[in-house]
Amino acid sequence: MLVHIVLFKWKEHAPETTINHIIDELNYLKNKIDFIQEISAGKIFATDFEGYTHALVVKVDSHADLSEYRNHPAHQAIIQRIEEIKERIHRIDFES
């Protein structure tokens, strides 16, 4: 199992409604990309994450699946919207 984690830090004036819509779209990817084993995106409730307010966790079975996930059109469409309002993101992938 491979785990893909992303932390999001949004631009200061990014609309909360846009952020919430992106989080909803990320959670819905399981319905569009059948090889995703688990996916969860949401707001970070801790206050000490240096301005990072949201996180995404995706679990897939293989490196090939992770590569396909990254390039999948449904994922790429969300990435375009994220790029418009992100200040910074951190990604980490590991084997579980």
Image (tube, helix red, strand yellow):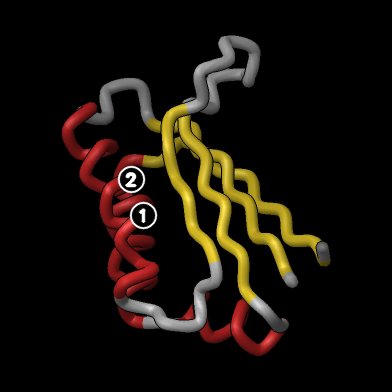
Q: CA distance from mark 2 to mark 1?
A: 6 Å
Q: In the rendered view, does 55 fall on the left or right side of 74?
A: right
User: Residues at badges 2 and 1 in contact (C-beta under 8 Å)?
Assistant: yes
What is the quadrant of residue 17 in the picture? top left
Q: Amino acid at mark 2?
A: Ile
Q: Which residue is mark 1?
A: 27
- The location of residue 73, given as percent across then percent down, is 33, 81
Badge 1 marks a residue whose secondary structure is helix
Q: Which mark is residue 23?
A: 2
Residue pictured at 72% horizontal, 54% vertical: 92
Quarter of the figure with the N terminus: bottom right
Instruction: Give the residue at x 71% y 82%.
Output: 63
Q: Is residue 3 above or below residue 7?
A: below
Q: Nearer the viewer, mark 2 or mark 1?
A: 1
For image coordinates 51% across by 25% down, the residue present is 44
Residue 4: x and y in percent read: 65, 60
Q: Is residue 26 above or below residue 75?
A: above
Quadrant of the image containing the C terminus: bottom right
Q: Amino acid at mark 1?
A: Asn
Residue at position x 66%, y 89% from top? 64
The crowd level at tag 1 (other Cα within 10 Å; few <14, some 14-19, many 20+) is some
Whether 96 is drawn above or below 73: the answer is above
User: Disc 2 on helix, strand or loop?
Assistant: helix
| Outermost residue, front side | 37
Please tell me whether residue 8 is drawn above or below residue 93 in the rendered image.
Answer: above
Residue 38 vs residue 26, the one in the foreground: 38
Q: How far across and down, in percent of the image, does residue 69 sit? A: 50, 78
Left or right: residue 25 compared with residue 35: left
Q: Residues within 10 Å of mark 2 (few under 14, many from 20)?
A: many
In this orientation, which residue lies closer to the viewer: 56 or 90?
56
